[in-house]
Amino acid sequence: MEQYNLGLVESRFADLVWQQAPLTAAELTKVCEKELGWKRTTTYTVLRKLIDRGLFENREGMVSVLMTREDFYARQSEAYVERSFQGSLPGFLAAFTSRRRLSEEEVKKLRKIIEENE
């Protein structure tokens, strides 16, 4: 499950790659220096971690996306529900709504999602 968890720094880095890829590794180091204040070695270390997790690839100096931001966070959400609620989406929703009332708009959106998946 750790594969779908990012720390704050990794998350900021991943967002930069998702926003700008494809880009060269050299361009990425410049972006990270400007945006995050990182040295080249830090950029390559974090990039390697996220390559190992299957998010990105660095082929011949070109960094590209293997897993979109949306797909990553969907998988992260699935892993959270599995880990915390034994895979029960109704259990998750019951816990979520026990302390926060859903708006009419949220209820409509959820109904639409359910109807589309019946």
Image (cartoon, rainbow, N blue to C red):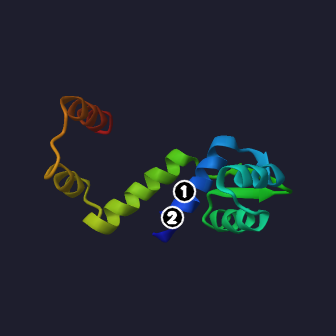
Q: CA distance from mark 1 to mark 2?
A: 6 Å
Instruction: State how many labels appear.
Output: 2
- Disc 1, disc 2: CB below 8 Å? yes
In the rendered structure, the answer to whether residue 1 lies left or right of residue 10 reads left
User: Label 2 sits on what residue type?
Assistant: Gly
Residue 85 in picture, x, y percent from top left: 26, 64
Circle 2: element type: loop
Compare residues 8 and 76 and report the one nearer the observer: 8
User: Label 1 sits on what residue type?
Assistant: Ser
Q: Residue furthest right?
A: 60
| Residue depicted at 51% across the width and 60% down the height | 8
| Residue depicted at 75% across the width and 52% down the height | 28
86 w.r.t. 29: above or below: below
Residue 94 in picture, x, y percent from top left: 16, 53
Residue 116 in picture, x, y percent from top left: 32, 33
17 w.r.t. 2: above or below: above
Location of the N terminus (image quadrant): bottom left
In the rendered structure, the answer to whether residue 15 lies left or right of residue 78 reads right
* Mark identifier at residue 11: 1
**Residue underneath mark 2:** 7
| Residue depicted at 78% across the width and 51% down the height | 30
Location of the C terminus (image quadrant): top left
Compare residues 31 and 45 and report the one nearer the observer: 31
Residue 93 in picture, x, y percent from top left: 21, 51
Neighbor class of circle 2 (other Cα within 10 Å; few <14, some 14-19, many 20+) is few
